[in-house]
Amino acid sequence: MSHYYSEEQDVVSNPVHFTYTYETHELKLKTDSGVFSKGSIDFGSNVLVRAFLQEDRRYSKILDVGCGYGPIGLMIASVYTDSAVHMVDVNARALSLAEENASTNHIDNVNIYKSDALSQVEETFDAILTNPPIRAGKEVVNQILDQSYERLEDAGVLYVVIQKKQGMPSAKKRMEGLFGNVEVLSKDKGYYILKSVKG
């Protein structure tokens, strides 16, 4: 059986369309079976997007790890039109949807490509965001955190959304160990936004 963190999906396609809004920005998004949070943006991703954008800090190069069909990266790219936003996922169907959603919404400041965690990411960034695939296991989550540190420039910032009951304390401890700092930027209904700064 395939999962949303699998490369190929064997579940039957059943597309769903919905609209995602942040302030005056509106995205028309297409989702499908075999991708994370089909039918609407999941609560944690929405908390992450809003916490990041409310920081009101412009980053020039941003990476969305585990982008799925694209709600996080595409909304950020639509708000920060001068930023270059890279979006990666291992799920081929999700990547195809993300590219289609970028085209539908006329968003051209994105670069969408396949990567297992950050293993195929070659550039460095001043901000990385992730809603990590908890169901893929702690080892995968830790890999994303470790590789994010490596791919951040000095003074670069990592933003992670994670539920307390799904491993927030251990993720927070690992980020503290990697970066030497971690703060809870916000929390909502058990979802925590963790933030660490490199250097």
Image: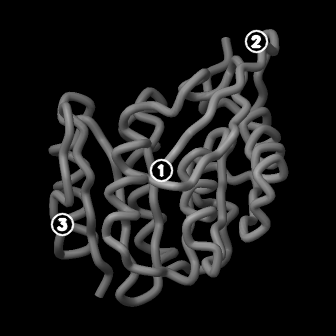
Marked residue nearer the N-terminal end (3 or 1)? 1
Q: Position of residue 148 (x, y in %)?
A: 46, 66
Assign a secondary structure to mark 2: loop
Q: Which residue is mark 1?
A: 22
Residue in the picture at 45% in, 31% down: 42
Marked residue nearer the N-terminal end (3 or 2)? 2
Q: Which residue type does callout 3 highlight?
A: Val
Q: Which residue type does callout 2 highlight?
A: Val
Q: How many marks?
A: 3
**Separation (CA) of disc 2 from disc 1:** 31 Å
Residue in the picture at 41% in, 45% down: 141
- Crowd band around label 1 with a 10 angstrom C-alpha radius: few (<14), some (14–19), many (20+): some
Tell whether label 1 touches label 3 (CB within 8 Å): no
Assign a secondary structure to mark 3: loop
Query: In this view, which residue lies farthest toward the front?
Result: 24
Marked residue nearer the N-terminal end (2 or 1)? 2
Tell whether label 1 touches label 2 (CB within 8 Å): no
Residue in the picture at 60% in, 32% down: 5
Displayed quadrant of residue 34: top right
Q: Which residue is mark 2?
A: 11
**Separation (CA) of disc 3 from disc 1:** 26 Å
Is 3 left or right of 99, judged from the image as shown? left
**Separation (CA) of disc 3 from disc 2:** 39 Å
Q: Nearer the viewer, mark 3 or mark 1?
A: 1
Q: Position of residue 163 (x, y in %)?
A: 25, 35
Q: Nearer the viewer, mark 2 or mark 1?
A: 1
Quarter of the C terminus within the rendering: bottom left
Q: Which residue is mark 3?
A: 182
Q: Which residue type does callout 1 highlight?
A: Tyr
Quarter of the N terminus within the rendering: top right
